[in-house]
Amino acid sequence: MRILLLVESFNSLSQRVYAELARDGHELTVEFAVHDVTTHEGVALFSPDVIVAPYLKRAIPRSLWSRYPCLIVHPGIPGDRGPSALDWAIGEEQAQWGVTILQANETLDGGDIWAFETFPMRVAPKSSLYRHEVTEAAVKALRRALALYAGKTRQPLPQGRLASCPDIPRGRAHPPMTQADRAIDWQADPTAAVVKKIHAADGAPGVRDRIGGKTVYLYGAWPEGVLRGAPGALIAQRDGAVCRATVDGAVWITHMQAVDADGRGLKLPAVAVLGTAAADLPCPPVVAEKAATWQEITCERDGAVCHLHFRFYNGAMSADQCRRLADAYRALRETDARVIVLHGGADYWSNGIHLHVIEAAASPADESWRNIEAMDDLVLEILANDRQLTIAALSGNAAAGGVFLALAADAVYARQGVILNPHYKNMGNLYGSEYWTYLLPRRLNADESQWLRAGRLPLDAAAATAIGLIDGAFGRTPEAFTDAIARLARAWAHPQTWSAHMARKVAERARDEARRPLALYRAEELEQMRRNFYGFDRSYHVARHHFVHKTPHSRTPLYLAAHRRMRAKNAAQGLRS
């Protein structure tokens, strides 16, 4: 079918839906819901069979849903209504939740039901549930809804008939969750309640609080198992996070956002936001992997295999984080391990340089340079490792420099459904570094590389495997993927297997270095990056500013809007003639 995706932004769910439906053979285009006028224009240009809204905050106008079937992806069970569906599900400690595919009508979230899918809830941030359980359920339910619509064999179920269907779970209408609903009482709330409230607001909008005379929004909560203090007091810091005592324990808060008088602010590591209020906090030493505490980088040993975990919030990697990870990797190079497995976060493996930290710096250009140099140093540590084999295990999505960081490993595997965006140009024509000019040609030919970089479209793990960008995709859940990676790494660590791989790796690296040294790739990439950071073209800085401040889109990018690309091409031909 011809399917138009109508979205607020091209977020992780929208990208997954795009990748899955494209593989199913549908003809797709994307239209950002900027304004009703432009939405109507986009729909008229494409003339879709179906409009699908995987991520939309505004109502679809009657003039569209009365003429086209408009399928809404709602992150709630049948009957649930309201913009805070997942927030309330976490707050009410629902055991089961789901995703419902609705046909748009005059009642927000009140349309007829085409399909739904349920899943067990886990204790996790809203953003993590959204990127895993919600996304998987949405893809399944949407496929079912599109098949039913195409087959014309069944009509959708009116929500008014839910009461007569005891086998279907039933939700209810919820108001938007307010900051009053989310408020933490540090003198009364136990750790579990504090974590739950921050979980229910993670990603957006955060939990408003006041610390050290400053109003901030809280994100990224992790319970602490040992440290204690007076309820509400800041008692420790580690890896940019702060630990705050509760009535029965303590909780780590990794990120905060301080909002200025204009309502603008950057989500940054908590220590950076609090400044002097956190400057003198003690930093407890790093502890074992299984301890109930927060630390960004941990390592666990499994025989001859070292599993190196780095949990960077939203996959962003500042210069300091890159250096800490490089130090941890370098330390493992000195051990007798034969295989190192790189595990990024479960939600995002890595998204490259930390745009929020860069935007907050006194000189964003200088901080950009520090960050990309640190990323390059980290990649070089992996490429130059002649003692161990390295496996990149992508349980979460990756983009830009994060993809090329993974490609520095000797093998790259991803969980099924992981989305990759192996390009930089969406950030103001950023050229990119991380030795991509060396790493990409090792896997793709020139035409494939150009298509990948110029097209700027997301690839799911299956598609990335099919073209040879990565080595394999398996495991529907993070747990299944992690188990499979552990078995694979143990097999690689077998002395005979390891010896064969190492001999080939060392020979190939020596041959490549003799042909063209890595230093030349880096120097040429950084020369281009210097122009991005310091040159007369300010597009990178403008794009970064809009990205971190979540500036509303003013148009649909042409690389996503196939229907608008054709019109632009025809207009250009008309001008030339």
Image (tube, helix red, strand yellow):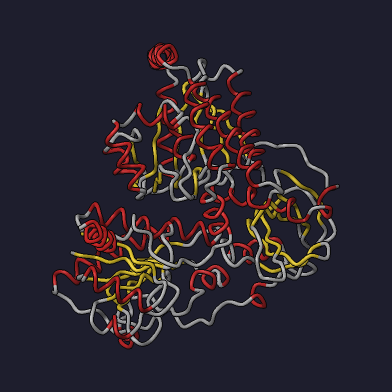
Quarter of the picture containing the N terminus is bottom left
Q: Nearer the viewer, residue 119 or 324?
A: 324
Q: Is residue 469 left or right of residue 361?
A: left
Quadrant occupied by the C terminus: bottom left
Number of labels in the image equals: 0
Q: Residue at x 61, y 38 (%)?
A: 369
Quarter assignment of residue 150: bottom left
Q: Residue 469's quadrant in the figure?
A: top left
Q: Looking at the image, which is closer to me, 205 or 64?
A: 64
Asked if one can make out residue 496 in the rendered structure from this viewpoint, the answer is: no
From the viewer's perspective, is 202 left or right of 483? right
Depth order, front residue of 313/33: 33
Rendered location of residue 346, percent (x, y): 50, 47
Q: Is residue 182 visible?
A: yes
- The vertical placement of 475 against 487, above or below, is below
Residue at the front extreme, as displayed: 577
User: Residue at point 30% right, 74% down?
Assistant: 41
Residue 308 location (% of width, % of height): 56, 33
Question: Left or right of 254: which side holds 13?
Answer: left
Question: Which residue is at a point 29% across and 75% down the rendered structure image?
Answer: 70
Determine whether 392 is above or below 30 in the image: above
At which x and y percent is residue 356?
61, 52
Q: Position of residue 458 (x, y in %)?
A: 36, 49
